[in-house]
Amino acid sequence: MDEARARDVLAAAGVLPGRARDARLLALGENAVFASGDLVVKVGRDAELLDRARRELAVAVWLAEQDVPAVRAAVPEALSVEGHPVTVWHRLPEPVRSAEPRDLAELLLSVHALPAPSFELPPRDLLDGVERWLRLAGGAIDPADAAYLRERRDGFATAAAALTPRLPPGPIHGDALPRNVHVGPAGPVLVDLETVSADLREHDLVVMALSHDRYGVPASAYDSFTEAYGWDVREWSGCAVLRGARETASCAWVAQHAPSNPKARAEFERRVASLRDGDATVRWYPF
């Protein structure tokens, strides 16, 4: 789904106060995210994401009931428009500063303290999307690279299922990065709730460890995260397994953009090569 297609779906949905062509594009990945007036609209890449969109709305309601600072839905149901899920959200005020790792840690503590909601949350299957992302990549990537990632997926899925956690399992955010925190006048709030799951709490902590190792997050920033949370997941013997699973998924995620974006293809090839070489020092770049 490119921007033009997403705007066509946005126009067909008829949920904005203004014209779809005037909406501001905030992000284009698995969802195209548009802002207009007091609303933000997410247009999912394909119909396979409809159930996830519905669950994200349920999560938003639940977090509001639990007084966890998070983005709030403006329309209570997900729409299906021309084969694409569409959800509508209240637009957050302009940020007063960039989110920092310690902001994320404090919000994670709030989420990790929650009991399970009344509805079912899925496990955080990091590797669930690998096949779909590789399929979307098609011939834009080397078939040998796709086969390699499938093999890694299967190996890490087996290893992850056998892990013994240090923390009690329960609700997690699932994609715990500072970019998924918005700091407005009232303080930090969680955004992008589509990966909220019920699984090992360590999933949320491994994300920042990988960000430090692969994406250049400074040691001081990572230390502020572990200090605010109260524990460093790297002390846990299962850290390498969840890290490896997330690296595999992150690599495959970039692949879906390779057909239309040469920079994505180059980043995909960089990531695959570093995994093949077993070189954990190769810098990856956010995409």
Image: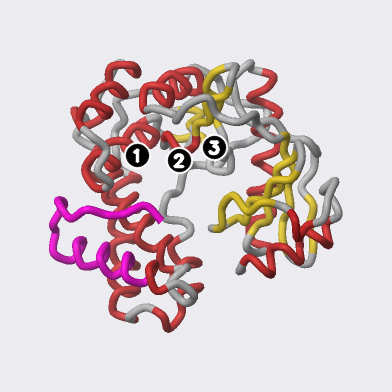
> Residue 2: image x %, image y %?
61, 69
Q: How many marks?
A: 3
Depth check, front residue: 137 or 6: 6
Q: Quadrant of the N terminus?
A: bottom right
> What's the residue type where badge 3 is placed?
Val
- Looking at the image, which residue sits at the far bottom? 139
Residue extent of the magenta highlight: 265-287
Residue that numbered label 3 is attached to: 196
Residue 192 placement (x, y as % from top left): 57, 40
Q: Say which residue appears at 64% left-offset and 56% top-offset.
A: 49
Between 21 and 130, the one lying in front of the other is: 21
Let me know if residue 283 is in the magenta part: yes
**188 with respect to 134 (left or right):** right
Q: Nearer the viewer, mark 2 or mark 3?
A: 2
Q: Are marks 2 and 1 in contact (CB under 8 Å)?
A: yes
Label 2 with label 3: CB-CB less than 8 Å? no
Residue 229, percent across and down? 34, 19
Q: CA distance from mark 2 to mark 1?
A: 7 Å
- Dot label at residue 175: 2
Mark 1 lies on residue: 207
Q: Secondary structure at mark 3?
A: loop
Q: Residue at x 83, y 57 (%)?
A: 13
**Coordinates of residue 88 in the picture (x, y in percent):** 75, 43
Q: Answer with mark 1 or mark 3, whichever residue precedes in sequence.
A: 3
Q: Amino acid at mark 2?
A: Asp
Looking at the image, is mark 2 or mark 1 earlier in the sequence? 2
Image vertical order of residue 274 relative to residue 70, above or below: below
- Quadrant in the rendering for residue 100: top left
- Residue visible at 27% across and 28% down in the picture: 221
Question: How many other residues sit within 10 Å of disc 2, few (<14), some (14-19) or many (≥20)?
Answer: many
Assign a secondary structure to mark 2. loop
